[in-house]
Image (spheres, helix red, strand yellow):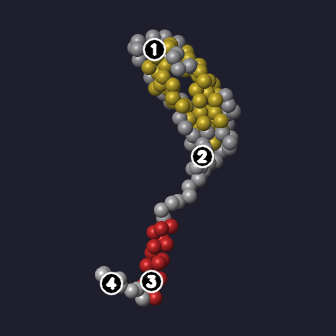
Amino acid sequence: MMKMARLSGGNRALWLGAGLLLGGCTTIDRPTGPGAEGPVGPHSVIVQPAHDTTIAAGQTLNVLVTVTSAHGIDTVYYEVTGASTGLTPLVDVESPVTFGFSVPAGSLLGDAVVIRVNAIDSLGQAGDTAVRFVQIQ
């Protein structure tokens, strides 16, 4: 028969505390569901152009974006790769947001214009980025 070592009063309290500490770490209550990470920045959706839009080189394309935020919209940033550079952010706007750009006449057939839009709310939180590809025909 194996003998068990007896723990003295001080050692017993130490082992009991360590067991409770380790046992208490097996589950952690975390908030779940929408907004569980705290405040969320604005949500941007490109409504127009549609997913399957094509455009000819030299034409102008108008973009319609809806932006929703519980804290108001401060600034909307947009980028158009393959068509324009140096676009000025839109400040103090309300949703829906519209802007347009011209596709360069020298664009190659089959190339794509990539539109990216995101917004910052009045708390300074950046939202998700909406992306749309438009094929040049």
Q: Which residue is mark 2?
A: 33
Measured Cα–Cα span from mark 2 to mark 4: 52 Å
Q: Quadrant of the C terminus?
A: top left
The numbered mark at residue 3 is 4
Query: Is 99 in front, or is 128?
Result: 128
Measured Cα–Cα span from mark 4 to mark 1: 83 Å
Measured Cα–Cα span from mark 2 to mark 1: 40 Å
The disc, 2 or 4, on the residue closer to the chain's N-terminal end is 4
Q: Which residue is mark 3?
A: 12
At horizontal 43% and vertical 79% (from top left) the residue drawn is 15
Mark 4 vs 1: CB contact within 8 A: no
Q: Name the residue type under label 2.
A: Gly
Residue 45 screen position, x and y as percent: 59, 30
Q: Nearer the viewer, mark 4 or mark 3?
A: 4
Q: Nearer the viewer, mark 4 or mark 1?
A: 4
**105 sits to left or right of 3:** right
Q: Residues within 10 Å of mark 4 (few under 14, many from 20)?
A: few
Element on which disc 1 rests: strand
Measured Cα–Cα span from mark 4 to mark 3: 17 Å
Query: Is 33 in front, or is 87?
Result: 33
Residue 50 screen position, x and y as percent: 56, 19
